[in-house]
Amino acid sequence: MPLLRNACIGLFSLCLPLLSQAAVVESLYQVDVPPRAEADQAAQLQVAAQVMLERLAGANAKVDSGPLADILAQPGQVTRQIGSLGEDGALRVEFDPLLLRDALGKAKVPVLGRNRPGILVWAVEGDAYSQDFLAASGEMGQALKTAARYRGVVLTQPLADLQDRAGVSEQDVLDADQAVLAEASQRYASEGVLALTVAREDDSWALSWTFWLNDRKLTGKAESPDPLAVADELMRAVAAEVHQQYAVGGLAGAAPVAGWVLEVSGINSIDAFADLQRTLQQLGMETLPSLLSVQDDQVRFRVDFAGDRAQLERMLMLDQRLVEVDAPEVETAPTESLAETAPSSAEAAEQGDTLYYRWR
């Protein structure tokens, strides 16, 4: 397929990282800071910097010394633009991605990129006498959206149409029935499932949740008279779990940057090749992926990734067009000796560092 090969090589350096099928955090480097009583702009900038660092480096990042402490002390050194959102004093702060990445690299902390797992929230609101699915347009529904955006969580809510209601009842959500919710969630492109109970008594909001992401389960509760505050506590817990599972690189003793070979079949057009390239460019790789070969509908890339195989596989699974397949069987002639048929050490190493996928 020489035409595709030549076109791919030319496109490789020209294609821009556009949206892929993975969940991508929009406006990742932009933080909207609500107005605060008796808070000047310097204090608001510090709040914005704290939120920005948590989005990328997680809530447990050490910020009392080193490069991250410098950012909190002088947020202006990594900001690109500061604007007012109205007369109430709210600010929109846009940070410089390159300056932040440089500081995070010096701090040697695991970093979470723009591609993140989508989280589907099944939420029920009510009391002991009546419950119903939470309305996305209601006060708590809006608070959850705002808090998710604030914390860099890709949150979606089911349609709650006849199909959803036939598969999931309010009681299933209250019971946090994982089997039922997982089955119903297959309709939506999400990696994590959140079962949320919302109760309002007098002037207080109470949330109780169970969160599943891959093979981990997280539970928690929060209560506050402020719907945005209680929603933010939930989203901060979700964001911390996402960071723990998907952030890569940084920590001393973590897996070093390693070169992996990614072999993908089913690439039948230039558009498919470009989509695959965009996906790889958004997965937090240390460098741009390099094209190794193109043969028929099969392409091979080398990717440099600061994490182990399990982390890389989790990141690749964020794009559901990539389906993992078994390594192809290597045919050997029965009459040849073991010495003649055994792969070289270099070939064996490459075989062990190769991941195989099919594009659909």
Image (spheres, rainbow, N blue to C red):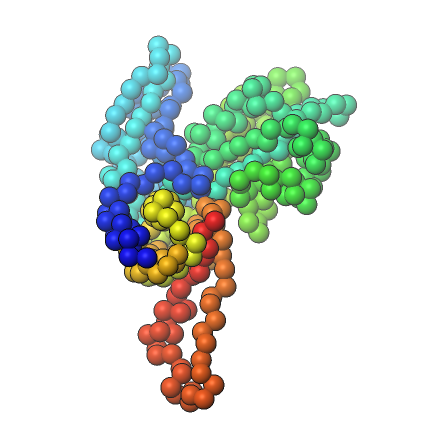
Between 17 and 84, the one nearer to me in the picture = 17
Between 351 and 84, the one nearer to me in the picture = 351
Q: Residue at x 35, y 10 (%)?
A: 87
On the image, the x and y values in percent for residue 151 come to 44, 33
Left or right of residue 188: residue 197: right
Relative to 255, does residue 344 appear above or below in the rendering?
below
Q: Residue at x 35, y 77 (%)?
A: 345
Left or right of residue 223: residue 324: left
On the image, the x and y values in percent for residue 294 come to 33, 59
Question: Would residue 173 be seen by someone viewing this image from the given angle?
Answer: yes
Question: Would residue 262 be seen by someone viewing this image from the given angle?
Answer: no
Relative to 342, does residue 272 appear above or below in the rendering?
above
On the image, the x and y values in percent for residue 37 come to 40, 16
Name the image quarter holding residue 263. Answer: bottom left
Between 113 and 127, the one nearer to me in the picture = 113
Left or right of residue 226: residue 19: left
Give the residue at the far top of this rendering. 87
Between 335 and 27, the one nearer to me in the picture = 335
Q: Quadrant of the N terminus?
A: bottom left
Q: Residue at x 55, y 49 (%)?
A: 214
Name the image quarter holding residue 66. Answer: top left
Relative to 266, does residue 45 appear above or below in the rendering?
above
Q: Residue at x 47, y 66 (%)?
A: 327
